[in-house]
Amino acid sequence: MDETRGYDVAIAGASIAGCTAAILFGRAGLRVALAEKHRSASTAKALCGHSILGGTGPTLRRLGLWDRMVEAGAAVGTPAVRGAAGWMVATGNDLPPTISLRRSRLDPLLRATAAATPGVDLLLGTAVTGLLADGPRVTGLRVRAADAAERVLTARLVVGADGHRSTVARLARATEDVAPNGRFLYWAYYRGVVPRGPGHAQIWQLDEDVVVSTPTDDGLTLLGAFPTKDHLPAFRPDLAGGLEAFLRRLPDGPDLSGPGGSPR
């Protein structure tokens, strides 16, 4: 037999978007169900970067997360961009600082903040199996909990924050917006990286290829390449070797020759 729980807001997905929405709705005095299919609060996105653009600073401070991220070891600074004409470096207050914290630390921090917000119920191990509807209006979520029990979460507002291949979007038959993808991404963490370019972090935008180098917590640097797919044959036999060969061709590319200059 289904157990029904009533909320003002039901959110599917307790990652960055879902936790942010839950915190703000909870602070507004609403009762929020935050359903997350993974059972562990420490689950983190593996295929997602973590360098957060400076324009998000006011929101992170509003959420009370900026200082907590810094305490967790986040790296803060302003990046420089290398184009065909050379380096472009922001001065003064032209560009707000970015902040970088690995998802393995950021995601649990977000969930802990959401769970501690009055009015928010963090429901770990709770997978969405269906939508409730009253005509064209979605009125809640049908979910399966970790104990295999079926539950119904009714709500005045339902938020689908379950990311790539969203179950909520599929069940709602939302229209997809699809664009061709002519790139691939390979990135790794390194220790002992010595930057040769200016700025706290560096971004290379050369022809059609993009490369990033950004410090993060625990003394690590994320090095990532976003090449066009014609570079795939050079990467496939040896991914780390392909990345490092790509980095060596950069003007003012990072120096990996120091102690610890290898993937982590």
Image (cartoon, rainbow, N blue to C red):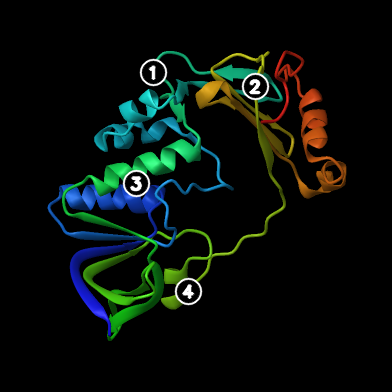
The residue labelled by disc 4 is 170
Q: How many marks?
A: 4
Work out whether 203 lies above or below 47.
above
Residue 93 - label: 1
Quadrant hosting residue 35: bottom left
Q: Are marks 1 and 3 in contact (CB under 8 Å)?
A: no
- The amino acid pointed to by label 2 is Arg
User: What is the x, y in percent for residue 112?
Assistant: 31, 43
Q: Give the SS element for disc 1.
A: loop
Q: Which quadrant would the C terminus be assigned to in this image?
A: top right
Q: Secondary structure at mark 4?
A: helix
Residue placed most toward the observer, 65 or 127: 127
How far apart, in angstroms, are the residues tagged by discs 2 and 1?
30 Å
- Could you tell which of marks 1 and 3 lies nearer the N-terminus? 1
Q: Position of residue 95 (x, y in %)?
A: 44, 23
Q: Residues within 10 Å of mark 3 (few under 14, many from 20)?
A: many
Task: Name the kind of residue labelled 3 in the image.
Answer: Arg
Q: Is residue 222 above or below residue 152?
A: above
Q: Quadrant of residue 74?
A: top left
